[in-house]
Amino acid sequence: MTTCLPDTTETRQAIIDTCLRMEASGINQGTAGNVSARVADGLLITPSAVPYAEMTPDMICKLPLHGDPDPVGRKPSTEWRFHQSIMQARPDVGAVVHAHPAYATAIATQRRGIPPVHYMIAAFGGSDVPITGYALFGSPELAAMVADALKDRDGCLMANHGATTVGPTLDRALWRMEELENLARVYILALSSGTPVLLSQADIDDALGSFASYKPQ
């Protein structure tokens, strides 16, 4: 089921508020992250190189679901391509959150994903959080890799870059980013003190079943 928000001042402010929450929690720094939300005739996304505290609803950029942005006016985030590609491939996605959280990015620099070290891995739809290959930020190549990694997951790491999470709503996508960073932190701490014991596929299947009815607000 596709989740679409109306293109209103309130929706645009909700995108900004999501960015501010992300910054306040320490998940992102400066202007590195970006947030988008699906609307009936495309998507809304944060502008390029504008600090969150300075954003206003009229600065939020609107893009078509297919095709390039309007060349006239404020430039959208340099990462608009993978936001667009995700929403093309996943009609159930209503919002996308991208950031450079420290622990998740640290693992991404090692070019590995996160294995099932904790049952919260099920919040991302499977037995791991996958890692993409590396490509230049904002490139079509990166957009293709991120969309592919998220075809059956709700979060991924991006090699030498950061992380991206999705959800039916802005709140859900941000919740997943917060959970992903905590999961990455747990994994790094476990590795630093020993060898973590991974959950079995049966354990993950049980967790996935429980998450099917878990709906945080």
Image: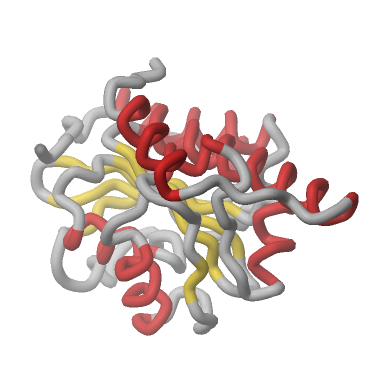
In what quadrant of the picture does the C terminus appear?
top left
Structure colour scheme: secondary structure
Q: How many marks?
A: 0
Q: Position of residue 18 (x, y in %)?
A: 49, 32
From the viewer's perspective, tell me whether residue 191 is left or right of residue 174.
right
Could one spot residue 183 in this view of the protein?
Answer: yes
From the viewer's perspective, tell me whether residue 103 is left or right of residue 176.
right
From the viewer's perspective, tell me whether residue 134 is left or right of residue 100.
left
Q: Position of residue 127 (x, y in %)?
A: 44, 52
Considering depth in this image, is 134 or 201 the residue closer to the camera?
Answer: 201
Considering depth in this image, is 113 or 91 the residue closer to the camera?
Answer: 113
Q: Position of residue 87 (x, y in %)?
A: 22, 55
Q: Position of residue 36 (x, y in %)?
A: 36, 47
Instruction: Write the residue at 50% across / 80% down.
Output: 133
Instruction: Write the residue at 35% across / 53% down.
Output: 153
Could one spot residue 35 in this view of the protein?
Answer: no
Instruction: Write the residue at 62% across / 47% down.
Output: 117
Answer with the quarter of the image where residue 57 lies: top left
Answer above or below: position of 15 versus 51.
above
Instruction: Write the residue at 16% across / 72% down.
Output: 67
Answer with the quarter of the image where residue 68 lies: bottom left
In what quadrant of the picture does the N terminus appear?
top left
Residue at the far right: name it: 193
Residue at the far top: name it: 217
Answer above or below: position of 202 versus 86.
above
Considering depth in this image, is 191 or 68 the residue closer to the camera?
Answer: 191
